[in-house]
Amino acid sequence: MSAKQQLDQRLAFMRFDHKSRSALKAAKAVIDVEIHSALDSFYDQVRATAETRQMFSSRAQMDAAQARQADHWRKLATAEYGESYAQDVQKVGRAHVRVGLEPRWYIGGYALVAEQLIRAVMAKRPRGLFAGKDDGETAEQIVALMKATFLDMDLAISSYLDIIQDERDRLEAERAAAEQRQATAVAAVGQALARLADGDLSARVDGSLSAEFHGLKTDFDNAAAALADTMKAVERATSGIRSGADDIARAADDLAQRTEQQAATLEQTAAAVEQLTATVSRTASSAKEVSSKVSEAAADAQRSGEVVTRAAQAMTQIESSSAKVSQILGVIDEIAFQTNLLALNAGVEAARAGDAGRGFAVVAQEVRALAQRSADAAKEIKTLIADSGRQVEEGVDLVGQTSQALRGIVEKVGAIDALVDEIAASANEQASALGQVNVAVNQLDQVTQRNTAMVQQSTEATHALRAEAADLSNHVGGFRTGGRAGYASPTESAHPVHEARARVAAFARPGR
C-alpha cells in the first residue's frame, strides 16, 4: 500500500470528509494569525525544559525550526493532504529519529499548540442572541482542527516507528550475518584446537575466514607455532635440568651445612649479647641508686648548711647579749663603788657620833663588805663574759668556715649528682641499644633457622625436581612438533640452565 493510500485510509477512518475540510479551511485565517503566538508559547516551554532545550545547539537553530513548523501548520490548515504532505510528515519523523526526540515530547508539543489554536478559534466566534448557528460552525472548526492535529501526529509517530523498525531490521540482518561468520570461524578454530588437543602442534586454522577473524586465524597460527618452538626448547632444557639438578643438590647440601654453622654461631652471639645487655642494665640500675643516694647526701649537706647558718646567727646574738651583760655589770660595779663610798662616809659619821653611832657603824661596815663583794663578783663575771665573748667570736669564725665548707660540699655533691645522672643516662642508652641489638640478633637467628629449614626443603625439592624432569621429558616426547623451523637453538654456554649451574657451582666453592 502506497503512502497516499495509507493517508486516504486514515482520513476515511477519521471521517475527515468535505465538511471537515471546509470547516478547517474556515479556521485557516485564525490559524495563520495565531500560529506564531502558539509556537512562541511552545518554544518558551522548550527552552524552560532541560531535556528539550539540549536538542538545539543555538537560538538560531531553534528559530529556524519554529519557522518550518509555522509553515507546516499553515499547510495543515489548507486541508489538502496529498503525496507532498505525506512526504513532509515523513521528513519530520526522520528528523525526530535523527535528533533522538522521543514521541512524548512532540505529543506534548501538539497539545500545547492545539490548546492555543482552539482558544483562538473560540475567541473569534460570534457572540449575541443569534450566535447559535455560529457556535455550531465553531464546534465543527474545532473538531476539524483536532482531527487534522491527530492525523499529523499519527503520521509523524508512524514514520518515527517505521524508521525505528527499519533500523532494527537492519541491525538484525547484520547480527545474523555476523553470527554465521562467527560460526564458520569457530568451527575452523575448533578443528585446529582438536588437533592441538591430540598433541599435533603443527595444527593450523584451515580455510579462509571473514575479515574480522583474520586476526584470530593469524594469532592462532602464530600461537601454535610458538607453542611448537617452546616444546622444542622445553625438550632441550629438560636434559639440562636433569644434569643441573645434581649440581643444585650438592650446592644445597653444602649450603645447609654452612647455614647450620652460621645458626650455631648466631645463637652463641645472641647469648653473649643478652648477658652483656643484662650487665649494662644492672649498671644502669646501680647508677640510678647511686644518683639517688648522692641526691640524698646533697639534701643533707644543704640542711646542714642551713643549721650552721642558724648557729652562726645564734652566736652573733650571744655575742650581742654578752656585750649588754658587760654593760650591766659595769653599772653594777659603779653602783658597788658608790655604795662603798657611802658606807665609808656613814662609818666616819658613826665614829663621830660615838657610842650612839656604834650600831650604825657596824651596819655601814657590813654594807661596805657587801659592796666590795658585789664589785669583786662583777669583776669576775665581767672577766668571764670577756672570755666568753672571745670564745663566741672564735665560734662565729669557726661556724662561718664550717658554712663555707658545707657550701663547697653541696656544690661538689651537686656536680657528682649531675655526673652520676649522665652515667645513668648513658648506661640506659647503652642498655636500650644493646636491647635493640639483641632483638636484631634474635631475629637474625630466627631468619637463619628458617633459612636452614628452607635449604633442607630446597634439597628435598631438588631431588623431586630430577624425578619431575624425567617425567616432563616423557610427556614432551608425546607431542608432534613437525618439521617447521622454530626458534634458534641456544648454544651450550648461553643456555639458562647451564648459566644457573655455573652460578650454583661458584656459590658452592669453599671460602664463600
Image: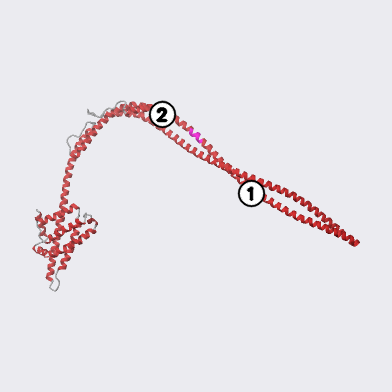
Q: Specify which label sits upstream in the sequence, 2 or 1.
A: 2
Q: Is residue 294 above or below residue 336?
A: above
10 Å neighbourhood of mark 2: few (<14), some, or many (≥20)?
A: some
Residue type beneath disc 2: Leu
SS state under label 1: helix
Disc 2 versus disc 1: nearer the observer: 1
Q: Which numbered dot is residue 306?
A: 1
Asked if residue 458 shows in the view, the reply is yes
Task: State which quadrant residue 73 falls in.
Answer: bottom left
Please tell me whether the stretch drawn in magenta is mainly helix, strand or loop.
helix
Quick check: 253 left or right of 415?
A: left
Percent across and percent down for residue 352 are 89, 61
Quick check: 491 left or right of 133?
A: right
Q: Nearer the viewer, residue 134 or 192?
A: 134
Q: Nearer the viewer, residue 447 or 308?
A: 308
Q: Which numbered dot is residue 16?
A: none
Extreme residue in the right direction: 355
Residue beneath label 2, please?
255
Percent across and percent down for residue 76 are 12, 60
Residue in view at x 71 percent, y 53 percent: 320
Inspect the magenta stretch and tell me whether residue 508 lies in it. Answer: no
Quick check: 324 left or right of 504?
A: right
State the separation of the CA atoms marked 2 and 1. 75 Å
Task: State which quadrant residue 125 falls in.
Answer: bottom left
Percent across and percent down for residue 8 are 9, 57
SS state under label 2: helix
Residue type beneath disc 1: Glu
Q: Nearer the viewer, residue 342 or 28?
A: 342
Region rendered in magenta: 269-274
Percent across and percent down for residue 227 are 25, 32
